[in-house]
Amino acid sequence: MNTILTRQEGAVYEIVLNRPQNLNALNDEMMSDLAKVLLELDQNSSARCVLLKGAGQSFMAGGDVKLFHQQIQQPAGQRNETFKQFVGLLHPVIDKMAHFPLPVVAAVQGAVAGFGVSLTMLCDFVIAADDSFFTLAYIHLGTTPDGSSTWFLPRLVGLRRAKEIALLGDRIPAAEAVKLGLAYKVVPRADLDTEATALAVRLAAGPTHAYGNTKALLHASFSRDLMDQMDAEVTSFAECASREDFTEGVTAFVERRKPKFTGK
């Protein structure tokens, strides 16, 4: 795989978008490589946190507009089918990330645009360098957002702010992104890798299964009524209580020491 790099340090599995010469703009190859990495990660029992990064000066500048330009000479009907297929290829990757049980941390710098914004909204934590900015940008191409952004954005920032972000396509500085809920915190560019890695290591040492169950509960809450959600909480709590990490957590609390979770 050329467009995605991976490595594992301890229990932290690092995924790097690797088209820096194109600001990590998304193309067919990158979509395919990312899908393969996520499938492989499903079989990796030693990984307990994912750290997502972009090589070079920017996290991701969205779709590859140069690739789009190659398609505009097609007749309208053919172009319609071409982009249906291209955008549709994203869906398995998005679905996998949206339901991923491991905590996912994104470290972003420079441009976070188009599908880059969608990717960050699929992550649990976004640490933003102080030189980063977020923009959906689709409107500047005369098209609409894709990649699940119209589903996640109003849930994160509210409907009215989502309309502002999507219809105006303005750049949102990192500090404003934190205020809106698009990022967890802002750090100096020089500290981005250190800060993101530290958070990933912290999460990798936590109760992995409980993290996954908590994420699933929170996501499902939008489609359940109160009683159904509380029933799901009961099921999840009891299931977690039957695992080794619960035994360790309770024992450590009583013994007044830091727990040593194993993810089991």
Image (cartoon, helix red, strand yellow):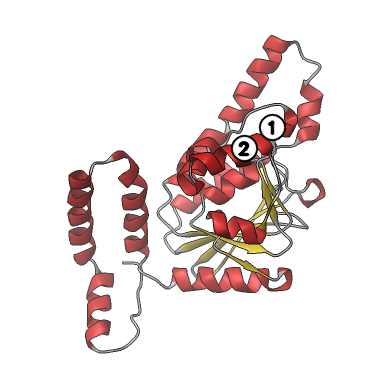
Give the percent coordinates (x, y) of residue 192. Answer: 66, 69
* Left or right of 64 in this view: 127: left
Whichever of callouts 2 and 1 sits on the residue coming sooner in the sequence is 1
Which residue is under mark 1?
A: 139
Q: In the picture provided, is 15 more to the left or to the right than 18?
A: left
- Residue at 67% over, 27% down: 143
Q: Quadrant of the C terminus?
A: bottom left
What residue appears at the point 32 percent right and 62 percent down from the top-left corner? 210
Under circle 2, the secondary element is: helix
Mark number displayed over residue 114: none
Q: Are marks 2 and 1 in contact (CB under 8 Å)?
A: yes
- Measure the C-alpha gap from mark 2 to mark 1: 7 Å
87 to 228, vertically: above or below:
above
Q: As displayed, is residue 67 above or below residue 107?
A: above
Q: Disc 1 residue type? A: Ile
* Mark 2 closeness class: few <14, some 14–19, many ≥20 residues within 10 Å: many
Circle 2 residue: 166
Q: Quadrant of residue 70?
A: top right
Residue 29: x %, y % from top left? 68, 38
Q: Amino acid at mark 2?
A: Ala
Residue 141 image point, x, y percent: 74, 30
Q: Is residue 163 above or below residue 86?
A: below
**Residue 2 location (% of width, % of height):** 71, 48
Q: Can the viewer see residue 47 in this picture? A: no
Query: On screen, 53 above or below 70?
Result: below
Classify mark 1: helix, strand or loop. Answer: helix
67 lies left or right of 91: right
Q: Report the front residue among 75 and 228.
A: 228
Q: In the image, is 13 to the left or to the right of 59?
A: left
Residue at image coords 68%, 73%: 191
Residue beneath the point at 20% across and 66% down: 241
